Image (cartoon, grey):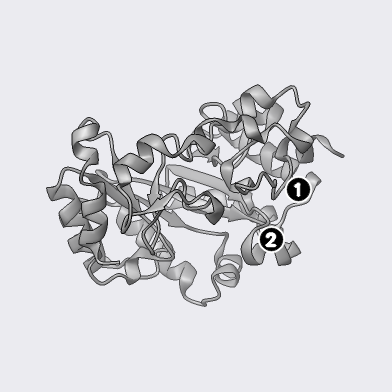
Amino acid sequence: MPFDDFLNAIEPLKKAYPKNSILVAIMGGEPLVRKDLAECGKKLRENGFRWGIVTNGYAYDETMHAKLISAGMGSITVSLDGLEQNHNWLRNNPKSFERAVKALELIVSYPRLNYDVVTCVHQKNLAELPALKEFLISKKIKNWRIFTIAPIGRAAENPEMLLTNEQTRQLMNFIAETRKNDSRINLYFSCESYVGEYEKKVRDSRFFCRAGINIGSVLIDGSISACPNIDRSFVQGNIYNDNFLDIWENRFDIMRNRSWCKTGICKNCNDFKHCNGGAMHLWTAEKDCIMGCVKEKILKK
């Protein structure tokens, strides 16, 4: 997408919302394959928008670090999906771990950056989380976010990607124990689902899916939606045909009123008032639940 197309689409937000209340997160795919990424970021800052990226770190070297910092990048998330063998297995590249760690070393050396490391937990790397924690601490990493994989896309056909009920409880216990007893690193569970009794133990605040409430997105073809992880059936328009601000303010009811989720396993659940059917990426706009209930996975023995 020509970057000016995106910039023109979000320009009206500056007049509608307070300065610095908007953060543009550039993600993918992999944003670092875009040769003009620094120029894109510079245009965002010149137009009053804060910005950051989500990256696998593979192409984040000293030159790229300097360019992005000079362009005003204020935040960055780097994926590290286990120790070297498991990370490289998931990323399908023998140099991926080495490159990601190098990126993290550069990021930590620049204290003005807001950053975190995000780890996708699956059956192959679950047992090495304690060792990964110590590795991150040795690299002076302070912020670590963990998530699991929803059964969508290719993951739906790969059982190694999906945790069992017992493994899900094991993960929750690891996060809770670390948060309670290890002040060396700030670990928390991501925003993917409501987790019942673990809510106060694995997060700073209770579950709240921000898709369509605090998060809107423009996809690579110009489609306007909420969190980029949600099903494409939730697309509400396109920047080449519609006004982004109008879409954001007037067409996101399906994400802001979740009463339609009160069906199936959610219909008689006492926790619906806290969960509202869970994260939007677990549903389609046809009211089909993709994943079921994470809280129930935790409770089931």
Query: Which disc number belongs to residue 161?
Result: 2
Q: Using the rendered view, name the quadrant where residue 181 is placed.
A: top right
Q: Using the rendered view, name the quadrant where residue 162 is placed.
A: bottom right
For mark 2, give the secondary structure.
helix
Quarter of the figure with the N terminus: bottom left
Left or right of residue 28, residue 268 in this image: right
For residue 96, above or below residue 285: below
Residue 166: x and y in percent read 80, 45
Residue 287: x and y in percent read 67, 44
Left or right of residue 225, residue 207 in this image: right
Q: Residue furthest right?
A: 301
> Viewer-proximal residue, 281 or 190?
281
Reading the image, the residue beneath label 1 is 167
The residue that appears at 36% across and 62% down in the rendered structure is: 103
> Viewer-proximal residue, 125 or 290?
290
Q: Pointer 1: residues within 10 angstroms few (<14), some, or many (20+)?
A: some
Residue 276 seen anywhere in this rendered image of the structure: no
Callout 1–callout 2 Cβ contact below 8 Å = no
Residue 295: x and y in percent read 73, 35
For residue 21, above or below residue 11: above
> Viewer-proximal residue, 259 or 265?
259
- Report the amino acid beneath label 2: Met
